[in-house]
């Protein structure tokens, strides 16, 4: 399942992405609230992350002004690996090497002005599988970091 959410800055981009994915027969669920100027990306990030954590096959798309805030907020939840992807290569590597489960996009960035580029970034993310192997060790180290609340004991 693919979930999508945006704050107010990403409404238009979100709608274009939903239409694009629906045309490709990919089911997308929009978890966004009313999308008013008072909405905050951390709230959207929490909702997206909860949906992804319900099933390890779920992926999500988070959109805010730069994608950075959404990524930071999503990554606060244990088990989430959210990546800001600005081109096809970063989207592919986010999935292949990091097993990213949320792609974060910026609606107010230069690359977002080219909707075909956004579609290519999404295709790279959604069509790439995790490579495993040597990357498993690295992801285990990330899980270990998630378990630690106090790094003073290091």
Image (tube, rainbow, N blue to C red):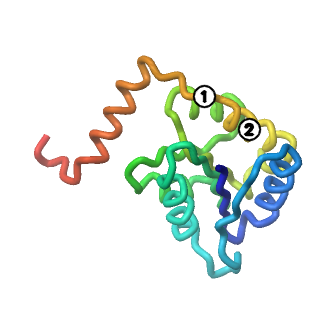
Q: Nearer the viewer, mark 2 or mark 1?
A: 1
Report, in whole angstroms, how far the alpha carbon at label 2 lies from the one at label 1: 14 Å
Q: Crowding near pointer 1: few (<14 within 10 Å), some, many (20+)?
A: some
Q: Where is residue 67 drawn, in percent x and y?
A: 62, 53
Q: Is residue 20 above or below residue 4?
A: above
Q: Quadrant of the C terminus?
A: top left
When asked about the image quadrant of residue 91, the answer is top right
Rendered residue at 57%/34% (across/down): 94
| Total numbered circles | 2
Q: Where is residue 89 drawn, in percent x and y?
A: 67, 28
Find out whether the residues at labels 2 and 1 contact each other: C-beta distance under 8 Å. Answer: no
Q: Secondary structure at mark 2?
A: helix
Q: Secondary structure at mark 1?
A: loop
Q: Where is residue 22 drawn, in percent x and y?
A: 83, 51
Q: Say which of 71 and 29 sits in front.
A: 29
Q: Is residue 87 left or right of residue 23?
A: left
Q: Is residue 4 left or right of residue 54?
A: right
Give the numbered dot on residue 112: none
Rendered residue at 79%/58% (across/down): 13
Q: Say which of 85 and 140 sits in front.
A: 140
Q: Earlier in the sequence, mark 2 or mark 1?
A: 2
Which residue is denoted by mark 1 in the rendering? 129
Which residue is denoted by mark 2 in the rendering? 121
């Amino acid at each position: 399942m693919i979930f999508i959410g945006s704050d107010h800055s990403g409404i238009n981009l979100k709608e274009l992405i939903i239409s694009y994915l629906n045309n490709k027969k990919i089911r997308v669920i929009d978890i966004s609230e009313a999308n008013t100027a008072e909405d905050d990306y951390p709230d959207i990030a929490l909702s997206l992350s909860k949906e992804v954590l319900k099933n390890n096959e779920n992926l999500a798309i988070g959109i805010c002004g730069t994608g950075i805030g959404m990524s930071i907020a999503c990554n606060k939840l244990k088990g989430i690996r959210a990546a800001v992807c600005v081109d096809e290569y970063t989207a592919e590597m986010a999935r292949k090497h990091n097993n990213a489960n949320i792609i974060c996009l910026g609606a107010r960035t230069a690359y977002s002005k080219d909707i075909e580029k956004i579609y290519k970034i999404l295709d790279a993310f959604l069509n790439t599988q995790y490579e495993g192997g040597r990357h498993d060790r690295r992801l285990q180290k990330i899980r270990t970091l998630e378990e630690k609340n106090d790094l003073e004991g290091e």
